Amino acid sequence: MAESHVPLNGTRHWVRTVGDLHAATPLVVLHGGPGGFIYDFEQLTGPALEQLGPVVYYEQRGSGRSDRPSDGEYSIPVLVDDLEQLRRHLGVGRMTLLGISFGGELAAEYTVAYPLHVEKLILQGTGLAGPLTPSPWAAGFDAVAADNKMRTAIRTAVERSGPTAAWDVVDRATVDRFLFHKPVSAETVRALGRRADLSTPARCPPG
């Protein structure tokens, strides 16, 4: 098991590896956000995955224990290249990518750019939006809104500025109902973040 800060494209990224990365194809876990962290997944789900093979925990630039880039660059092409530079640093030919929420979008973008370096692609709670696949955020928040006031605020924001604008008006309770089956799970994740002294920076534009 090794934990370090790895310079990728001029920014130090927090990386933790478990197991022999060359004994089998490593599983690289990509957290959500943008601007989240992997600590909660690492503590709650990681131990079971580590019994199955080598695992790489990796926090994206400006997230968790990684440094914020001096140039403020968070574009998808840069995040994809950060992941490719990580693969080269690890010295592995192929990876299995587990993308959680936004991490799934990043994993999918990487797979399109570097298909020969991806053995398997696993998406968890990922909303891949396109012309034929509307963003799930607005509909999801609308479905779990506790009252008509919140529902109206979501619909108005979406009509004015598009699906991602729902994030600007939803409260914590609505987000928790959408992301977690049980309220206690949401508090467990937040408690882990506080224990690790991690704070989630402002959501970075995914463009």
Image (spheres, rainbow, N blue to C red):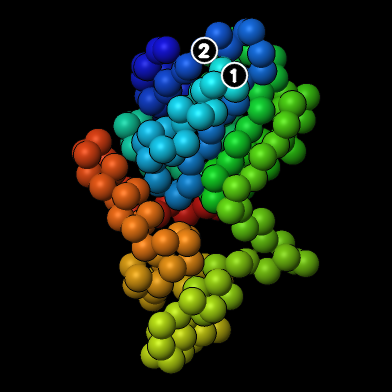
When the figure is inspected, residue 20 is found, relative to residue 115, above or below; the finding is above
- Which of the 4 quarters of the picture holds residue 118? top right
In the visual, does 12 lie left or right of 53? left
State how far apart marks 2 and 1 are (Cα).
7 Å
Q: Quadrant of residue 120?
A: top right
In the structure shown, which secondary structural element does the residue marked by tag 2 occupy?
A: loop
Amino acid on which disc 1 is placed: Gly
Q: Position of residue 73 (x, y in %)?
A: 44, 41
Q: Determine the residue positioned at 73% across, 65% down.
A: 133
Q: Residue at position x 34%, y 58% from top?
A: 184
Q: Is residue 20 above or below residue 107?
A: above
Which one is nearer the viewer's eye here, 169 or 82? 169
Which residue is located at x 60 percent, y 36 percent? Answer: 98
Residue on which disc 2 sits: 19
Q: Is residue 140 above or below residue 107?
A: below
* Residue ID at (32%, 50%): 188
Residue 61 at least partly seen: no
Q: Position of residue 139 (x, y in %)?
A: 58, 75
